[in-house]
Amino acid sequence: MDKRNLVLASKISNTGLRRDMMVLRNNFKQLINASKRNAEIQQKIDDVGDIVLQCCDLETLVSRTTGALKDQFGLTSTTFCLSDDFRALMPDAEPQHIPSLTAEKLFFMDAEKLTEIFSMHSGPILRGRLEHGSVNFFSIRELKRIRSEALIPLVHGGAYVGSMNLGSNDPVRYQEGAATDYLRRLAQVVSLSIVILRVKQQEVAG
């Protein structure tokens, strides 16, 4: 190979090397950014989980958890829908002079209907590009503001306790196929906490 071809080959090699290095740097930067985002999300989930574990009654749990989720993740609406089996955890009658902490945040559903809805899915139900949120899981007042939703089943001992419902005005925030690992872990904490509240109530009553 003459000198001219040698120089040309060296330039081509160096250009390819610089391009590969740039790709590697960009990939590494994306990996770092993704790791930071995941760490931030995990911290927010942990913070909400701590709130759940500190609640000693269902009314407080629903109120504080929905508020924390809404604030931490910038959501349009957050609610719970529980099986009718857990209705007894709520007071028989709200004091007239005290606003309910769970108004438009907590709904109850027949256990069979709840099972029917979620048994057809292997995990959270994610829906995007909606005209409105699901009627059974969000308040009428907020339905039209919801453009995507995540309905996360609360399961304990193979039975459906209920669901934790997240609604967003972003039509593509929740879509089928998106990762739900963090939400699943939080749902496990919430499910166990609600079941423990019922066990404690039964112990007091018994």
Image (cartoon, rainbow, N blue to C red):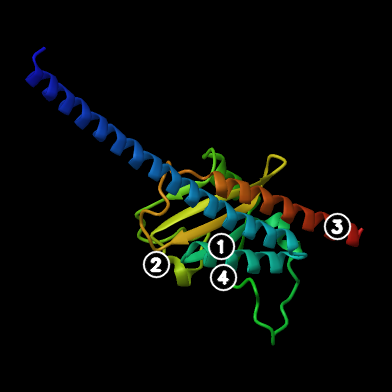
Are circles 3 and 2 on residues that touch, CB within 8 Å?
Answer: no
Query: Gap in Å between the C-alphas at discs 4 and 3?
Result: 27 Å
Q: Which residue is mark 4?
A: 104
Residue contact at pointers 1 and 2, CB within 8 angstroms: no
Going by the numbered disc 3, the residue's amino acid type is: Gln
Callouts 1 and 3 close, C-beta under 8 Å: no
Label located before the other in sequence (1 or 3): 1
| Disc 4 and disc 3 in contact, CB within 8 angstroms | no
Indicate the position of residue 164 as horizontal and vertical percent values. Answer: 58, 56
Label 2 residue SS: loop
Mark 1 or mark 3: which is in front? 1
Residue 69 disc label: 1
Numbered disc 3: secondary structure: helix
The residue under label 3 is 202
Whole-angstrom CA distance, mark 1 to mark 2, is 20 Å
Is the Cβ of the residue at disc 4 closer than 8 Å to that at disc 1?
A: no
Residue 70 appears at what percent x and percent y?
53, 65
Could you tell me which quadrant the N terminus lies in? top left
Between the C-alphas of marks 1 and 3, the distance is 29 Å
The residue at the point 40 percent across, 54 percent down is: 173
The local secondary structure at tag 1 comes to: helix
The quarter of the image holding the C terminus is bottom right
Give whichever of discs 1 and 2 has the lower sequence position: 1
Point out the tag, 3 or 2, that comes first from the N-terminus.
2
Q: Do callouts 2 and 4 mark residues in contact (Cβ within 8 Å)? A: no
Say left or right for 86 vs 9: right
Q: Earlier in the sequence, mark 4 or mark 1?
A: 1
